[in-house]
Amino acid sequence: MVLVVVLKKCDNFMMAPKIIAIDGPAAAGKGTLAKRLAEHFGMELLDTGLLYRAVGRKVLDAFVEIGDDPKFFSVIAEKIAQNLIPADLEVDGLRTDQAAQAASKISTVPEVRAALLDFQRDFAMNPPNRGKGAILDGRDIGTVVCPDADIKLFIFASTEVRAKRRYKELQYRGVEAIYARVLEDMEKRDARDIERDASPLIPAKDSFQLDTNNLDADRALAVVLDYIQNK
Ligand code: CDP
């Protein structure tokens, strides 16, 4: 008993959770936090947004227009999602805004989401490279993909703060961007993620909700590690 208390209080001996689910809107700080947690605990990381981006990219590559009406792209998007392989997540061009918008539209199709469920759950249950556990970040991990995750985090910040972060990130990567456009695209994507019927973006009831408006990456990690240690 004494040993357990001592281990719990000692950061180096913090037990790695088996599954950590991280959800939240774009540029809230999920990705950075997920990477830092994965390094800290030696866990394997799956950025589930990449799955949706890869499906969106492949639909565009098939010269199918992704407009506002899913009936024109839902069948091909479902087929592509059913046949997605890990190598599809390694291709160039998944981080572009075009891929993000495509992902946001194909992700409203319930059949696409269903087709990607097994991939995500398999990763969570059997993390590659004998990882000590799995971290998945996305929009519906704590609510739908891994409802039994040991740790559920919901990371958020105001739309303006997130748009500024994304704008800076684009500038850093040398991508030309206009702030007003970045803000507008983010608002559109948020609305689609929150309002869709299939697995909308909402915090899981038992999630730890972290407002990163005034937190840098180091501080966010420290707050979350403290939460995990004391849970
Ligand atoms: O990196 P960023 O947060 O901008 O986006 P992302 O995580 O790569 O996700 C791109 C889009 O995929 C999101 O806007 C969602 O519409 C969709 N997505 C989803 O529906 N469910 C997930 N688990 C992950 C992403």
Image: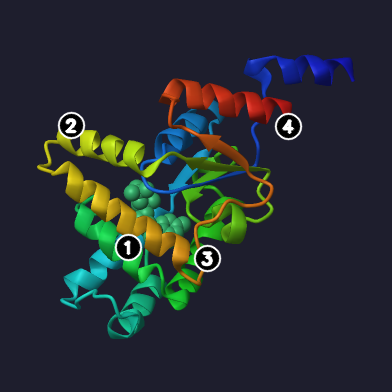
* Position in image of residue 53 (x %, y %): 31, 59
* Position in image of residue 44 (x %, y %): 50, 41
Element class at badge 3? loop
The part of the image, by quadrant, that contains residue 100 is bottom left
* Disc 1 to disc 3, C-alpha distance: 14 Å
* Position in image of residue 87 (x %, y %): 32, 57
First of labels 2, 3 by sequence position: 2
- Nearest to the observer: residue 95 or residue 91: 95
* Disc 2 to disc 4, C-alpha distance: 37 Å
- Whether residue 70 is visible: yes
10 Å neighbourhood of mark 3: few (<14), some, or many (≥20)? Answer: many
Is the residue indicated by label 3 positioned so its CB lies within 8 Å of ligand 1? yes
First of labels 2, 4 by sequence position: 2
* Disc 4 to disc 1, C-alpha distance: 34 Å
Residue holding disc 2? 172
Question: As shown in the figure, which amino acid type bears the numbered disc 4?
Answer: Lys
Question: As shown in the figure, which amino acid type bears the numbered disc 2?
Answer: Tyr
* Position in image of residue 91 (x %, y %): 24, 54
* Disc 2 to disc 1, C-alpha distance: 23 Å
Question: As shown in the figure, which amino acid type bears the numbered disc 1?
Answer: Ala
Residue holding disc 4? 231
First of labels 2, 1 by sequence position: 1
Element class at badge 1? helix
The C terminus lies in quadrant:
top right
Please say if 157 is above or below 84.
Answer: above
Q: Which mark is residue 103?
A: 1
Residue holding disc 3? 199
* Disc 2 to disc 3, C-alpha distance: 33 Å
